[in-house]
Amino acid sequence: MTDMVRSAVLSAVSTAALLAIPTLPASAATPAPAKPILTCKVKTPEGLSYTVIKAGKGEKPGPDSRVEVNYSGRLAADGSEFDSGEGAKFKVGGVIPGFAQGLKLMQPGGKYRLCIPSALGYGPEGGDPIPPNADLVFEVELLSFTTPPPKPVIAPADRACAQSTASGLGYSMVTSGTGRIPSDADMALVDFTLFDADSGVVQEKREWEKIPLAMATPLFAEGLKMMPAGSTYRFCMPKPDGTMGAPQSGTNIIVTLIDVRVTPATED
């Protein structure tokens, strides 16, 4: 081989070496994904464990708050992911107990790992795709939350009833009226407020509701048939009598009977 030919061959080899893509070991070319962390550091008295990945700032959400979060959920047994979401919005009180407890520890901008035992999750029944008695691990980032204003509360002196009927319906007259007392053939036009008998927290409030007495529950109809139009009464519900739609024990109601009208005839 002449010196000129040898020089040309070496030059070609050198150029090819510079342009070639080096071959890497398989392990270096595709590194194995990091295994998810499935343990938490701090345990609460209720059984929830958590780790603060990133602290947030500000107020903490309550049970009635509506949160916006990024999250992922895994099975603690094998680390497999069963759910995830970004910008998900829901009410704190509407999720499993362990998740709700964790959210109430957090502040906006914070990120936590929540280790939720089955008892605070989906329990022995499970829920597709979560098997029965499964412990769960969530990573949750709290983006923001809003909390509705507190519900009105009836004062303690205005919660109880002084008298009761033979059926057990408690009642007290709050203000008197001079109008007509409704019968089963009538329709009552009422304002009413439902509230918890113990705490006084208002559960529901309606105005100008038209209630045909023939379609009311027996206890409510009994109460309305005591009232002259223009009066306001407070009623305390006895234990449930099994009637479909009957108010539950522990719920009281304040009713103002605005007017009484004959129930319109219905067309067949």
Image (tube, grey):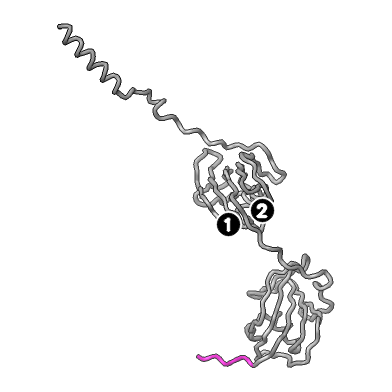
Q: Is residue 261 left or right of residue 13?
A: right
Q: Which residue is mark 1?
A: 90
- Whether 203 is drawn above or below 185: the answer is above
User: What residue is drawn where x is 74% and y is 67%?
Assistant: 201
User: Cβ–Cβ below 8 Å for labels 2 and 1?
Assistant: no
Q: Which residue is mark 2?
A: 61
Q: Residue furthest top?
A: 2
User: What residue is drawn where x is 57% and y is 50%?
Assistant: 69
- Whether 220 is drawn above or below 69: the answer is below
The local secondary structure at tag 2 comes to loop
Q: Quadrant of the N terminus?
A: top left
User: What residue is drawn where x is 73% and y is 68%?
Assistant: 152
Give the camera-side residue of 167 and 107: 107
Q: Is residue 79 magenta?
A: no
Which percent across, then down, holds residue 142?
Answer: 60, 48
Which percent across, then down, holds residue 42?
Answer: 68, 38
Q: Is residue 263 magenta?
A: yes
Which sits earlier in the primary sequence, circle 2 or circle 1?
A: 2
User: What residue is drawn where x is 17% and y is 6%?
Assistant: 3
Amino acid on which the number 2 mark rests in the picture: Pro
Based on the displayed image, in which of its 4 quarters is residue 50 positioned? top right
Mark 1: few, some, or many residues within 10 Å (few <14, many ≥20)? some
Which percent across, then down, holds residue 217?
Answer: 66, 80
- Whether 69 is drawn above or below 183: the answer is above
Based on the displayed image, in which of its 4 quarters is residue 202 positioned? bottom right
Amino acid on which the number 1 mark rests in the picture: Phe
Q: Which residues, given as a range, are shown in magenta? A: 262-268
Magenta span: predominant SS is loop
